[in-house]
Image (cartoon, rainbow, N blue to C red):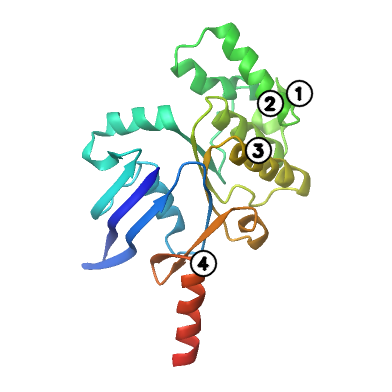
Amino acid sequence: MIQLEAIRKDYQRRGQALTAFQCESQRIEDGEYIAIVGPSGSGKTTLLSMLGGMLSPTTGRVLVDGVSLYEHSVAERSAIRGRKMGFVFQSFNLIPYLSALQNVQIPLSFSGIPAAEQQARATEMLTHLGLAERLHHKPSELSVGQQQRVALARTLVNDPQIILADEPTGNLDPTSREVVLETFDQCHQQGRTLVVVTHDPSVAQRATRRLTLVDGMLVDEDKASSAVSARVSAA
C-alpha cells in the first residue's frame, strides 16, 4: 500500500516559494490500477517522482508498505525501489551500445542472478512482448515502439509489485501502444499495483480509479468534476 500524508512540494522561483503539489491524504491499495490525469505542468511527474522515492516532499510523508521513504537515506530508498518498484518512462533510458537482451538483463545483474538465468528470463520477457526477432538489436536499430517495449521488459523482468509509469504510450505506434496497455492489464490481473500518469483519456479509462490534479491538488475523479463545475458556476 502507498500512502500520502500531508504532502506538499514547494519550489523557489525568483525568491518566492511556489507550491507545485499538495495532498492532505491519499491511499493507493495493493493491486489498484490508478491513472493520474491533469493538464501539462500540473505536477503529475513531480508526484510520480515522490512516490518512487526520487524527489523528497517539502513537508509530509510518503509511505510504501508502512515504510516512510524519506526518513531513510538515498541508498536505503534505492534498495526499496529495487525490491518493490519498476518504472516506465516516456524517455526509455536504454543503453545505446547494448542489445535489447543486454538492456533487459541489467536489473537482473544487480540482483546477483547467474548469467544463464538472466538471459533466459530476459529472452522470455522480450518474447512475451513480441520482440523475439529483435533480441540482439541495439536501440538505434529499433523503432520507437520497440524501444518502449524493451524498456517495459526491463521494468518487468525483476517482477516488481509496484509499477510507476510516466506517459508510457506517448508517441507510440498503435501496435506498440496496445502491447503496452495489454501488458498493464495483465499486471493488474496478477495483483500488481499500477500508477500511470497520462494525458490520454483512453489510457486513463483502462484504470480502475482515476485521480486528477486540480490547481496543484490531487483529488478523486468525482471530486475533481465537482471542483471544476464549481469554478464554472462561480465564473
Left of 177 or right of it: where is 64? left
Q: Which residue is mark 3?
A: 186
Closer mark to the observer between disc 3 and disc 1: 3
67 and 147: which is toward the camera: 67
Left of 24 or right of it: where is 35? right
Separation of marks 2 and 1 at Cα, in angstroms: 6 Å
Left of 1 or right of it: where is 175? right
Tell me if label 4 and label 3 are in contact, CB under 8 Å.
no
Separation of marks 2 and 4 at Cα, in angstroms: 35 Å
Looking at the rendering, which quadrant does residue 110 occupy?
A: top left
Tell me if label 2 and label 1 are in contact, CB under 8 Å.
yes
Residue type for callout 2: Leu
Q: Which residue is mark 4?
A: 221
Residue type for callout 4: Glu
Q: Which residue is mark 2?
A: 126
Q: Which residue is mark 1?
A: 132
Horizontal and vertical percent for residue 104? 58, 24
Query: Which of the numbered marks, if any, corresponds to residue 41?
Result: none
| Category of crowding for the residue at label 2, using alpha-carbon neighbours closer than 10 angstroms: few (below 14), some (14–19), many (at least 20) | many
Separation of marks 1 and 4 at Cα, in angstroms: 40 Å
